[in-house]
Image (tube, grey):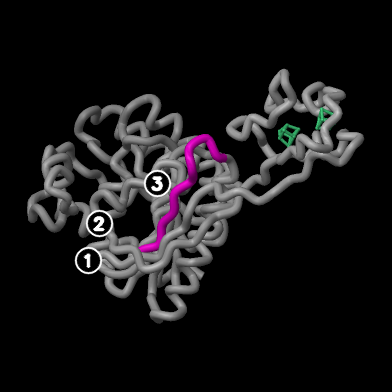
């Protein structure tokens, strides 16, 4: 079983549009949405939930008022200002660090589990899909990404799936690292803007650091042909292949409005290019390792 992660370094490059189209083109694959802070593949693919699992992230301080003597030590030592002036825990601010439990002289505080989000196993029209959502303002998205990936692997083994296609989160942080570590191939979807190029370079540093083979695809390459040339030149210096250039086409937006992938909605140039990129990826996945 081979794993491919699609990332972008930043949001809004068309990564999810491309990943959703791959899900429709792939045969015998599991789709994993690892953008747990802001998942959106489900909006397009309308999965039917089969299983829902609570995710316990950071713990939460709970105070027993009967034991509290209002000494104020917890408030004094809490770096997150999660203890109010009248010595109550402010749940939304608590990071579960445990300092208050440690300093409390009367044992009035203990750390308890809290549900920070949910992981799902679902079915959608192209096959199985695993996804998750982290509650608002919760931390530990990397942990939840790892759970989604474990669920994807379990399902892939059960279904004898050939490929896991992972839609990675934007950026270069912990959750991105959790979504690429151990995969066979990364596809970076970028766009020919200065911020797109800068973020692509940062994310390439991450794949380089973890020694994961990476390929690049330029979305809306024709909105700035000069910048596209710069992307190709830069990738060449890094030994990274640019395997596709997708033209700007409002088909991408129109297909999304009717909740279809580009390749379900159209058989035009954009759909053809996405199919071509998928064929290259499929071939590369068979070659790597
Ligand atoms: S440290 Fe313990 S006793 Fe002191 S205010 Fe906090 S909960 Fe109450
Ligand atoms: S667990 Fe940490 S963040 Fe939460 S209230 Fe205690 S000291 Fe503050």
The residue range painted magenta reads 129-138
Q: Quadrant of ligand 1?
A: top right
Mark 3 against mark 1, which lies toward the viewer? 1
Which residue is denoted by mark 1 in the rendering?
A: 125
Q: Secondary structure at mark 3?
A: strand
Q: Which comes before the other along the chain, label 3 or label 2? A: 2
Task: Give the labeled residue for mark 2.
Answer: 46
Work out whether residue 112 or residue 202 is closer to the camera in this orientation and state it: 112
Label 1: which secondary element:
loop
* 14 left or right, relative to 272: right
Residue that lies at the very extreme toward the right in this rendered image: 105
Give how far apart the Cα atoms at labels 2 and 1 are. 8 Å
User: Residue sitting at 86 percent across and 34 percent down?
Assistant: 104
Q: Verify CB contact (< 8 Å) between mark 2 and mark 1.
A: yes
Could you tell me which residue is drawn at 40 percent across and 46 percent down? 188
Rendered residue at 23%/36% (across/down): 220
Residue 163 image position (x, y, % from top left):
39, 70
Badge nearest the viewer, 2 or 1: 2
């Amino acid at each position: 079983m081979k794993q491919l992660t699609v990332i972008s370094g930043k949001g809004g490059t068309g990564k999810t549009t491309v990943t959703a189209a791959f899900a429709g083109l792939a045969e015998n694959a599991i789709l994993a949405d690892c953008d747990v802070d802001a998942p959106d593949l489900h909006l397009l693919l309308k999965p039917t939930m089969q299983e829902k699992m609570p995710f316990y992230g950071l713990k939460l301080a709970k105070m027993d008022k009967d034991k509290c003597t209002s000494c104020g030590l917890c408030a004094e030592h809490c770096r997150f200002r999660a203890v109010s002036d009248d010595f109550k825990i402010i749940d939304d601010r608590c990071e579960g660090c445990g300092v208050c439990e440690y300093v409390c002289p009367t044992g009035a505080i203990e750390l308890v589990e809290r549900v920070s989000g949910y992981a799902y196993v679902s079915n959608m029209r192209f096959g199985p899909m695993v996804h998750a959502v982290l509650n608002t303002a919760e931390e530990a998205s990397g942990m939840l990404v790892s759970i989604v990936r474990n669920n994807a692997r379990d399902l892939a083994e059960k279904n004898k799936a050939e490929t896991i296609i992972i839609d990675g989160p934007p950026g270069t942080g912990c959750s991105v690292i959790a979504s690429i570590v151990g995969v066979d191939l990364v596809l970076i979807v970028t766009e020919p803007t200065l911020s797109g190029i800068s973020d692509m370079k940062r994310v390439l540093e991450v794949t380089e650091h973890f020694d994961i083979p990476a390929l690049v695809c330029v979305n809306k390459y024709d909105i700035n042909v000069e910048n596209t040339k710069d992307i190709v030149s830069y990738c060449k210096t890094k030994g990274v292949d640019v395997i596709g250039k997708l033209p700007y086409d409002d088909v991408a937006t129109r297909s999304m409005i009717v909740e279809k992938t580009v390749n379900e909605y159209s058989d035009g140039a954009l759909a053809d290019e996405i199919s071509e990129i998928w064929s290259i990826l499929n071939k590369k996945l068979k070659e790597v390792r």
